[in-house]
Amino acid sequence: MLDKISKWKSSLTTKTVQEEKADPQIIPSHVAIIMDGNGRWAKQKGLPRIAGHREGMKVINKIVRRSNELGVEALTLYAFSTENWKRPKSEVDYLMKLPERFLGMELPKLKEENVKVRLMGSLDHLPSHTLDAVNKAVKETENNTGLILNFALNYGSRFEMVEAMKKVAMQVEQGSLKVEDINENVIEANLMTSDLKDPDLLIRTSGEIRLSNFMLWQLAYSEFWFTDVLWPDFNEEHYTEAIMAYQKRARRYGGV
């Protein structure tokens, strides 16, 4: 089992990645990333956890730019989960300020690069300053036609699916939907990603090999790529390495 897991992880050297290039004809349409390892990065350097989150925020710029260069259509970033509220209040408060800081600095550039900002998650409990910053970015980029930058903020996949089931049940109760007509398409239409394709590729940094309640429905047939690199150290070369690994996979969707 460990041998199989190791094959999923980053295997190419930096030199190899620099020498090779991703095939522009086989670029994943939608990439989802679990940005993990900020706290461990800070601990290794004897810094407070918030220092790791601050450095991790800087990485987003690089990955958004690289995604645009490669022709990725959608990039979903797991920014804050419904379980992250369990963290110390000081850390949560800082995390809630990051969207405002990031978008405050980067929104002009995102608009210039034709990026469309999108939010996925529950609005409950989010501070007004966080919502204001995200809503401003969503509003000012709504007509952009380039990369979709989808922030999963206060997001949990089980919560998402429960809410989808409630919507479906309400449609049945109101008579607009019959029980026998419920299928995968109906469920997908009621998920938070109803206007997005399912991710082709999931990337998780920091060496952890689990989904952590992230897009459980949507990742059913996605390719997974794990790396021991902590998120603040993740760069364009690592990202290209993940894309290249994806391009070597044979996607059968249950077939032969």
Image: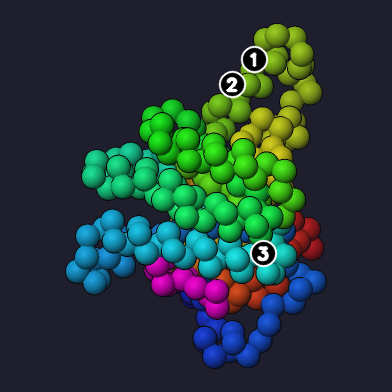
Mark pair 3, 1: CA separation: 39 Å
Disc 2 designates what residue?
Answer: 166
Asked if labels 1 and 2 touch by Cβ distance under 8 angstroms, the answer is yes
User: With 188 as the anchor, is 151 left or right in this view?
Assistant: left
Residue shown at 60%/47% (left/top)?
117
For residue 170, the mark is: 1
Mark pair 2, 1: CA separation: 6 Å
For residue 23, the mark is: none
Reading the chain from its start, which is encountered first: label 2 or label 3?
A: 3
Point out the image quarter for the C terminus. Answer: bottom right
Residue shown at 49%/50% (left/top)?
103
Q: Which residues are the magenta region?
A: 227-238
Q: Give the residue type that dot 2 points to.
A: Lys
- The quarter of the picture where residue 163 lies is top right
Secondary structure under tag 2 reads: helix
Q: Give the residue type that dot 3 points to.
A: Asn
Residue shown at 74%/26% (left/top)?
182
